[in-house]
Image (cartoon, grey):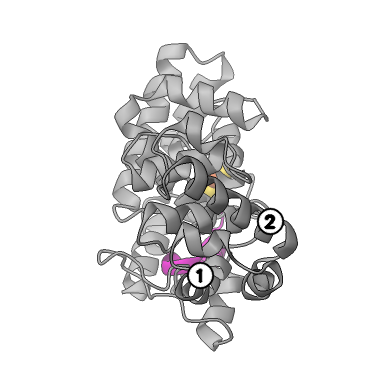
Amino acid sequence: MPGEQNSAVGEQAPASAGKTARKRAKATKKADGPESRLALVRRARRINRELAEVYPYAHPELDFRSPFELLVATVLSAQTTDLRVNQTTPALFARYPTPEDLAAAVPEELEEIIRPTGFFRAKARSLIGLSTALRDRFGGEVPGRLEDLVTLPGVGRKTANVVLGNAFGVPGITVDTHFGRLVRRWKWTDEEDPEKVEAVVCDLFPKADWTMLSHRVIFHGRRICHARRPACGACPIAPLCPAYGEGETDPEKAKKLLKYEMGGYPGQRLAPPPDFPGRPAAPLGTGDADEAREAV
Ligand code: SF4
């Protein structure tokens, strides 16, 4: 239940505030000097373990039923929310179920369907281009190799890693805006360039951890460690975070900042995995959808 999830996280903060402060003081003291490589690796892996306990249900937040659907949804997700993409793709895949169908789309008709995701002309060009490439160069199948995926129109390294990690089981780090922001707050790296961030983080973790680490970090960025006002006072990894205090530290006020299932709101997927403890998102134009959109 979303409410239970919310109170579980939010109410822990006041009860453990003293312990948290002591642990944080210790962490801060250690952080006064330069952190050794070994200490950084240990702290990074501990954060991953803590996040795994907080978000055992972490998952990609785009609805998809095949590698093709995930590829298309990921291209559409640029500059918009996963929720908005999920609300758009049912009509899109009903009209164009295969790469062959999408390659033959009339641009204006396709643009109209994907208009809610923004930048719809450029995205329509990418979708027709990548579908044509899938049809003509890959036998109508999405390739399972990074070097092939990045040759498709509109597909960069980030999109390729999302598809590889979630549709092919090939480990990959997805450096989106949340991932970059959080790993810099955690002082895993100072790099701004996503490819450099990816390389640094890959070096901190075994390959088998990469995909789930990406989901957990992005979940945390969307629910607790927000860009503008992180909910530090309700954050379970505060003792491990050098940026504690950048956001709201009062536990009660911080609890009110929690989003999605943590705050009792719907999630972003219309069809979430069975273990997701929150509510599914609703189709475009309904009250629940608007509520969830505000929570992005
Ligand atoms: S303590 Fe604050 S800055 Fe650090 S991870 Fe938690 S919410 Fe983010």
Give the class, few, some or many, for how many residues have Cα within 10 Å of label 1's Cα (few <14, many ≥20).
Answer: many
- Which residue is at a point 47% across and 56% down the rendered structure image? 234
In the shown orientation, is residue 207 left or right of residue 294?
left
Mark sitting on residue 89: 1
For the residue labelled by badge 1, is the local secondary structure a helix, a strand or a loop? Answer: helix
Q: Which residues are magenta?
A: 249-262
Where is residue 284? Give x, y as percent.
Answer: 56, 81
Residue type at mark 1: give it.
Thr
In the image, which is nearer the foreground, mark 2 or mark 1? 2
Magenta span contains residue 257: yes
Q: Nearer the viewer, residue 117 or 282?
A: 117
Disc 2: which residue: 125
Where is residue 219? Give x, y as percent.
Answer: 46, 53
Q: Quadrant of the N terminus?
A: bottom left
Label 2 – label 1 distance at C-alpha:
16 Å
Q: Quadrant of the C terminus?
A: bottom right
Where is residue 133? Give x, y as percent.
Answer: 55, 45
